[in-house]
Amino acid sequence: MDNTLQALAYFLLNRKRESAVLFRLNGPTFAAYLHGEDKQAALEYAEELKLQVERSDEFIAPLSISAAIVGNGELLETEVPPDRFFTELMKLGKERIKILDRLGPGSICTSSQLSTFRRSSGTVLLIESNDFEARLYRRILEAGGFEVSHARHGTQALARADEVRPDVIISEIFVSQMDGFQIRQRLLASQDLKEIPFILLSREKSDSSVRRGFEMRVYRHFRKPVMPAELTGAVQALIERRDRTG
């Protein structure tokens, strides 16, 4: 997979427009900023790259790319404060990337309902090995308006955190491959992921686990079962605090 991403990165770099600035966001996601060009130009560029990738023989296996397109003008007529403009633009791009998952491989997304997007409360990564409890807490979080990504074990959790970049991570302590504290330790060691707020949700809650959580900057440590309003309220408070501080 790493070789494929590296090959794709070189492919895109060698075919970039003069006005384009390319950078990698996370996982298999790349971004291009087209300076001085409009949304239609971006669409044409995306379609051109998509066709070139699909027809190329430079990859070991057939490859297809999807693209989410956002134009500055989409927010210019809104009431977004100037100091929040870039943040809101990135949020809109993130929403369209998620829409691509529903559209399927090789898709291009150029629009979404801003009003619908703004009602979304945020994204949560739920780390839980027990399938029943994963379904339960996923329903609670989704009922609270959050989008939920689920990981069953430690390695998957770290990969999902890097791929999704959630607003909040909620983890059970007893997770296969590595426990919740080990996952937290790995996240704290990552320059890109260490600031994501972390919540423990477990049947284990003792003086030692609480102290260890404080030492590792765990925001809250809930004992199962937790009241739905208490859990969703904690997640919402973290997201609102992030939005206030930027």
Image: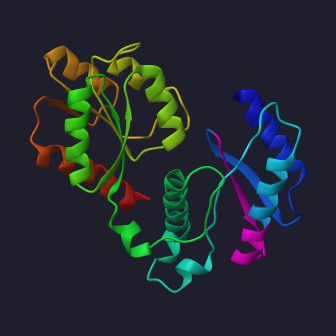
The picture places residue 59, in percent across and down from the top left corner, at 83, 35
Q: Quadrant of the N terminus?
A: top right
Residue at 14% x, 17% y is: 207
The picture places residue 165, in percent across and down from the top left corner, at 48, 43
Q: How many marks?
A: 0
The picture places residue 125, in percent across and down from the top left corner, at 37, 39
Residue at 54% x, 30% y is: 190
- The one of 159 and 56 positioned closer to us in this rendering: 56
Q: Does residue 234 appear in the picture of this structure? A: no
Q: Quadrant of the C terminus?
A: bottom left
Q: Is residue 191 left or right of residue 198?
A: right
Q: Is residue 245 left or right of residue 237?
A: right
Residue at 74% x, 62% y is: 46
- The one of 62 and 200 positioned closer to us in this rendering: 62
The picture places residue 241, in percent across and down from the top left corner, at 32, 55
Asked if residue 38 is among those painted magenta in the image, a careful observer would answer yes
Residue 23, compared with residue 154, is above or below; it is below
Magenta-colored span: 28-44
Residue 56 picture quarter: top right
Asked if residue 204 is among those painted magenta in the image, a careful observer would answer no
Q: Does residue 207 appear in the picture of this structure? A: yes
Residue 120 picture quarter: bottom left
